[in-house]
Amino acid sequence: MTSKKKRIALIGLPVLQSVNNLCNAAIARRAEEGGDWRFVLSAEASVDAFKFLRTLDCDGAIVRIMNTAMLREAKKVEFPLVNVSSWLERPGVPTVRHDYDAVGRMAAEHLLEKGFRRFGCVLVSGGWFIQQRYNAVVKAIEKHGATLKTFQLNTTMPYTIQPLAPAEKRRFIEWLQTLQRPAALVLMDDWDAPALMELCREAGFEVPRDLVMITTGCHSEVLPLCRVPLSAVQEDQELQARLAVGCLDVLMSDKQSRDTMINVPPLGVVERASTATMAIEDGEVARAVEFIRAHGFEPINVADVSGRVQVSRVTLERRFRQVMGVTMHEYLSERRVRRAKELLMNDAGISLQTIAQQCGLADRRRLNQVFVSAVGMTPAAWQVENSR
């Protein structure tokens, strides 16, 4: 006997149209592959759309709640729904959204690993998530003893590609010229990235020779407009879709309303030409860092790194600590612990032995030792602590 298909509504996710959004596409694939969903509505996000949603005979809905007026109507819906928008910090309905703290931290750590210690940050007006990304960038930079200068970009219409006012251009160039080269520039969003990149050139900064650039807000329509391909932290939209679908399935099964909040970790940094350089003047240290970045998740140790550089191990370790602020062993361990955290967050059922192997460690015992030394708790305890 064929089970009845669930009637699913979508607000703000037009999967019944041709779209490029990976989250929308993943939801559409779920309907095809699962075979038990049937879309009965696909509408743009608006207050009227949520009002209409209340009149439908549906089993569930995946929606984008963009403001408090939409939220008020969404809370009146009697069947389960899952929100995939980040516009409201505390929506009070089941929500699956991106981990903006991780996004900001990942951008800063990517450049810190390359040896950059002088940072500029371009802060823009916008939602709470802009500030959360910025706070994470600041925290990561300060943790490593690096310096940071912040520029507040004043635009009349955030989240649109628009020309900057002449006075704003001059103000940015004047601020930029206070940065000592080589420096790193972290953008809180990329809408103004093409214009800012041109202003860097006007100010005498070549990207990436004098100044590297990375964005924490990545939009596919903006990236091709940048003169130098822009590195970015990539959100995992497909995982967001899968988790939203799974969350809705659970809610439809037990018919209980839960204030669920799931934060989706980013995929990682997509490095392009704008950060394709190192800020390390010591050539031997730079080669050591490059070797660790390329092979750090393989079973290598400090002796292997030293063997690739034409100086003694003692000399290299001394110079590495002087330049990077940590020992080679600490630098290697930090990368492995960060990778272990990503694996723990992305797969709740992954074994510690598998994680150890994917981090270049001999076994789960060694993973526990390295993790406890860096974090102060075991991987299992950290996973429990960060899955609440």
Image: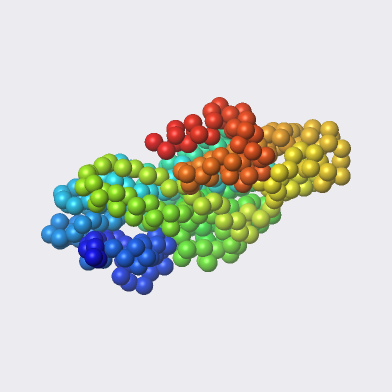
Q: Residue at coordinates 60% horizontally, 62% vertically from top-left?
A: 228
Q: Residue at coordinates 70% horizontally, 51% vertically from top-left?
A: 294
Q: Residue at coordinates 58% horizontally, 29% vertically from top-left?
A: 372
Q: Say which of 113 and 237 sits in front.
A: 237
Q: Residue at coordinates 34% horizontally, 52% vertically from top-left?
A: 246
Task: Give the x, y percent position of residue 181.
Answer: 68, 46
329 w.r.t. 299: above or below: above
Which color mode does the image show? Answer: rainbow
From where the camera sits, is residue 180 visible?
no
In the displayed structure image, the side of residue 267 where residue 1 appears, left or right:
left
From where the camera sits, is residue 383 visible?
yes
Q: Say which of 230 and 254 sits in front.
A: 254
Q: Residue furthest left?
A: 55
Q: Say which of 176 and 249 sits in front.
A: 249
Q: Say which of 312 and 278 sits in front.
A: 312
Task: Give the x, y percent position of residue 145.
Answer: 62, 32
Q: On the rendered image, what quadrant is the C terminus found in?
A: top left
Q: On the rendered image, what quadrant is the N terminus found in?
A: bottom left
In the displayed structure image, the side of residue 147 where residue 259 appears, left or right:
left
Number of numbered discs: 0
125 w.r.t. 34: above or below: above
Q: Residue furthest front?
A: 1
37 w.r.t. 94: above or below: below
